[in-house]
Image (cartoon, rainbow, N blue to C red):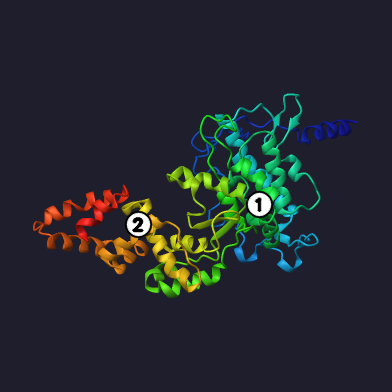
Amino acid sequence: MSNGTRGGQGRGRSVAQPRAPHPATVAQPRAPHPATAAQPRALTPTTVAQPRAPHPATVAQPRAPHPATVAQPRAPHPATVAQPKAAVGLTAPGTVAQRASWVPSYFRAGFWQRMRDGRHVWRAGEPGGRYRPTGEQHSRWHDVFSNPVYETLSDMLYRIFSKASAEREAVRYAEIYQLIVAASPQEITEAARDEEMLEAGARVLAPPDNWIPYPEPVPNDFPDLVKALKVRLVGAVRPHDPGPVDDAVRKVLGDYVRRRVDAGVNIAEHYVVLSANLFKAAQRKYAASLPGGGQVNAFTEEGTIYLSTSRGEPSTIIHEGIHLYASGNFRRLFGDSLDEGVTEYFARRVAITLNYQRDRYRDEHAAALRLVQIFGELAVGSAYFRDDHSLISAQYLKKLKAMGVSKLAQREASWLPFLQRLKEKKWDEAFRPLE
């Protein structure tokens, strides 16, 4: 038992007991040295990823399409455009359907604005119209252009003139001339023969001074209408065919009129023939600018010859044709009467070749004969047709010198008094010293 006890005690002492480590040998956790501790580092601005703006060269720029690649609007071919159909008997340029689209706006822009600018008293209304006293809105041109039926130029002008006459209103040629420009030759010829329409036009284009209570006189535009239409009515007096008259003038007075011929002057395209009433209406403007102009049988004004179907004679167109070929300044310098006399002098030379004997303007013609005898036909013709007065003035100074007026200043000073005596029809006083 003792063995067992010793053995047990021996074994008890030989078992390794866990020993607590010596404090000095136990690995203690070491605090990192401040110098070796990883410190959090603040990012510098240069290390922070900044958003980068793209380089302009790498940015896709919108590109303008090349002009060659852009689809251009193409004008339709004229052959594919639907053309307006002309009414039966009328050419396309003369149809109301074409004119009505722009004529009303033309009138409203010009005529109606003038009507409202103070010269005429208008009530408020729609553009191009006014209220009647009854309150009904009305347009002067509405009835003319709202009719879908094709009308000729003559019909349209008659309706315009009739409406203006009923309302006692004047019409200016500028307000209607576009209608004439747009009309066909057939319509113009028809209108030139429509005396009823022309009579209506004379009432509103050339109204008497007391017809419309306007503050100022109404200009006479009727001559412009008859010139544009080339009115050549047939009456008791028929002028000689202007074609042969032109030929005779150029043959007899060739050198004198050559410059005017080159400028396109001719009688055949620049004359009108009017009835008595129409002639009187056209003459009113001429008479206002020339003393005694209201008593003549025919007259020439602004490049047009005005003849009457009830005045004058067939050879009247010859006399007026000479006026047409004249320069026009002879009258201003030598006076109205001597101008008529020189015109008659050359007209008689032409009339003889056409088998006419003229005896008009006897006193004036006698004065013209004296002028030709003193200064010569070349000097007178050059002054009358070419506006060259140098030959007459030179002859005048030469004759005064022969009469004993030696000083040039005295001779030149007497030139203007000589012309004044001619204007005053003091022909004996003017011519006798020189004859």
Q: Measured along the vertical axis of the image, is residue 205 above or below residue 61?
A: above
Look at mark 1 in the image and give the residue it sits on: 179
Residue at 43% in and 46% down: 290
Q: Measured along the vertical axis of the image, is residue 359 above or below residue 261?
A: above
**Residue at the outermost right position:** 1
Question: Horizontally, is 236 left or right of 252 in the view?
Answer: right
Which quarter shows the C terminus?
Answer: bottom left
Residue at 88% in and 33% down: 4
Across and down, in percent, residue 360 comes to: 45, 58
Which quarter shows the N terminus?
Answer: top right
Q: Name the disc covering residue 312, or none.
A: none
The residue closer to the viewer here, 294 or 150, is: 294
Q: Measured along the vertical axis of the image, is residue 340 above or below residue 256?
A: above
**Residue at the outermost top position:** 134
Question: Horizontally, is 335 left or right of 174 in the view?
Answer: left
Residue at 47% in and 63% down: 358
Work out how far the residue at label 2 is from the one at label 1, CA to CA, in angstroms.
Answer: 38 Å
Q: Name the disc covering residue 330, or none.
A: 2
Question: Horizontally, is 187 left or right of 57 in the view?
Answer: right
Q: Secondary structure at mark 2?
A: helix
Residue kind at label 2, given as amino acid type:
Phe
Residue kind at label 1, given as amino acid type:
Leu
Q: Earlier in the sequence, mark 2 or mark 1?
A: 1
Question: Horizontally, is 322 left or right of 421 in the view?
Answer: right
